[in-house]
Amino acid sequence: MQHEDAIVSFEVSTGLRDLVVGEGQAEAALDHPLDQQTFHIRMANSQGRREAASLLLKKMYGWRGYAVDPGVMHSPNKITLFAETGGETVGTMSLCLDNDEVGLPADENFRDKLDDLRSQHRRLCEPSRLAIDKGVSKRVFAALIHISYIYAHNIHGYTDYVIEVNPRHVMFYKRMLGFRDFGGERECTRVGAPAVLLRLELDYMGEQIRKFGGLMEQHGNERSFYPYFFPTWDEPGITGRLVAGRL
């Protein structure tokens, strides 16, 4: 289904186990009280939309004791996506694209490791500032990640995700998306806490999407998030709306 200027819209029942996802965090949450919701994923390409995404970040990160700098919400090498339902913003994430002028947030703590990949002509991007409100379906998390993949890999030809996560949440990203250890553990200077650098080759993500995307509850024994990604035949429409939204 499609709604106004949304990149994609979809309905979700509360039968799915829900998650709260913060900066490298995922925790069990209470079910949302509504039996069914319609979610819309949009690009935060206006000041009002960026402010709404920033408010959700402040709420979710503040709950965990993190500070959020609203001044870095908008950057020329970054897109921000957000999910809304019933007029409320319930999920957001940003995707930073590596370039010679700006680089990535992870350069602050892992520049040497990222430069190793750059020397191999890998094109890097970094999902960041991810926040999902309490009780929101895991399909929202999957939708934001899938759309960021389409933007990075299918449209712009980037090859790898790199992320910094708290050590206690490493297994979540490994199990649910297939990230692997890459840079070891270091102190994250931005939050004053330990961080582990993980890497995911986007060719691998594409393989998992083609294999499991759209299966939903009919996923058999697959325990990752990939069954909750969109089926591959939805990607051309999403791609077209992403390009239009970015312009």
Image (spheres, helix red, strand yellow):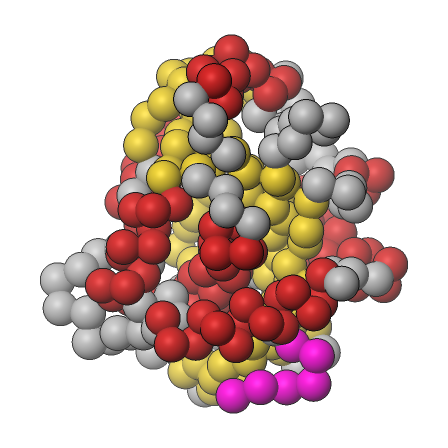
Q: Is residue 85 left or right of residue 138?
A: right
Q: Position of residue 231 (x, y in %)?
A: 35, 73
Which residue is painted at 72% across and 61% down in the image?
Answer: 246
**Residue nearest the observer in this picture, 150 or 6:** 150
Seen in the picture, residue 77 relative to 57 is either above or below; the reply is above
Whether 47 is among the magenta residues is: no
Seen in the picture, residue 136 relative to 14 is either above or below; the reply is above
Furthest-right residue in this view: 47
Which residue is painted at 63% across and 40% down in the image?
Answer: 96
Q: Position of residue 50 (x, y in %)?
A: 79, 56
Q: Position of residue 78 (x, y in %)?
A: 69, 45
The answer to whether one can see residue 167 in this image is yes
Q: Position of residue 194 (x, y in %)?
A: 49, 19
Which residue is painted at 75% across and 52% down in the image?
Answer: 54
Residue 3 position by quadrant? bottom right
Residues shaded magenta: 1-6
Q: Is residue 38 left or right of residue 206?
A: right
Give the main secondary structure, helix, strand or loop, of the magenta stretch: loop
The answer to whether one can see residue 30 in this image is no
Furthest-left residue in this view: 221
Seen in the picture, residue 205 relative to 218 is either above or below; the reply is above
Q: Classify the position of the C terminus by image quarter.
A: bottom right
Which residue is painted at 71% across and 67% down in the image?
Answer: 245
